[in-house]
Amino acid sequence: MNIYEEIKAFLEEIKEENENLSKAETPEEEKEALKEIFDGFMQGANRTREKIDQYNDRRWQR
């Protein structure tokens, strides 16, 4: 899976959890949805940072 597909998957996960947050009926459900949204953002950010690091490593190895 390339980086664009991975980011798209993370965004879909965040979108889905946002819908769950909107439908939450209890504070616990809201907390769980917010945690999942945060996890999606962090996974996307970490994966993007990994790709940037890979790019920089290749650039400096020339």
Image: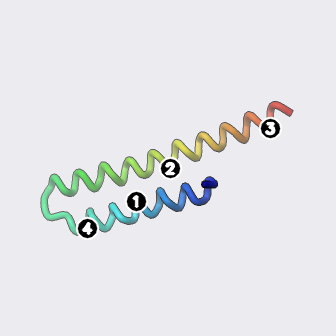
Residue 52 rendering spot, x and y as whole percentages: 66, 42
Q: CA distance from mark 4 to mark 3?
A: 44 Å
State the count of labels. Answer: 4
- Apparent side of residue 28 relative to residue 55 in the rendered image (left or right): left
* Direction front: furthest residue: 1
Picture quarter with the C terminus: top right
Q: Dot 1 surroundings within 10 Å: few (below 14), some, or many (20 or more)?
A: many
Q: Earlier in the sequence, mark 4 or mark 1?
A: 1
Query: In this rendering, is residue 56 above or below 9?
Result: above
Q: Upstream in the sequence, badge 2 or badge 4?
A: 4
Q: How far apart in space, not on screen, are marks 1 and 3 (Cα)?
A: 32 Å
Distance between the alpha carbons at the discs numbered 1 and 2: 10 Å
Dot 2 crowding, Cα within 10 Å, few <14, some 14–19, many 20+ = some
Question: Residues under labels 2 and 4: Cα distance?
Answer: 22 Å
Circle 3 — which element?
helix
Nearest to N terminus: mark 3 or mark 2: 2
Residue occupying the point 74% across, 34% down:
57
Q: Which mark is residue 14?
A: 1
The reply to whether discs 4 and 1 touch (Cβ–Cβ < 8 Å) is no
Residue position marked by numbered label 2 in the rendering: 44
Image point (58%, 47%), residue name: 48
Q: Which residue is found at the position 15% from the left and 55% from the top?
A: 27
Q: Residue furthest top?
A: 61
- Residue hosting label 4: 22
Circles 1 and 3: CB atoms closer than 8 Å: no
Q: Which mark is residue 59?
A: 3
Give the mark, 4 or 3, whose residue is nearer the N terminus: 4
* Amino acid type, residue under disc 4 in the picture: Ser
Which one is earlier in the sequence, the residue at label 1 or at label 3?
1
Verify CB contact (< 8 Å) between mark 2 and mark 4: no
Q: Position of residue 40 (x, y in %)?
A: 42, 51
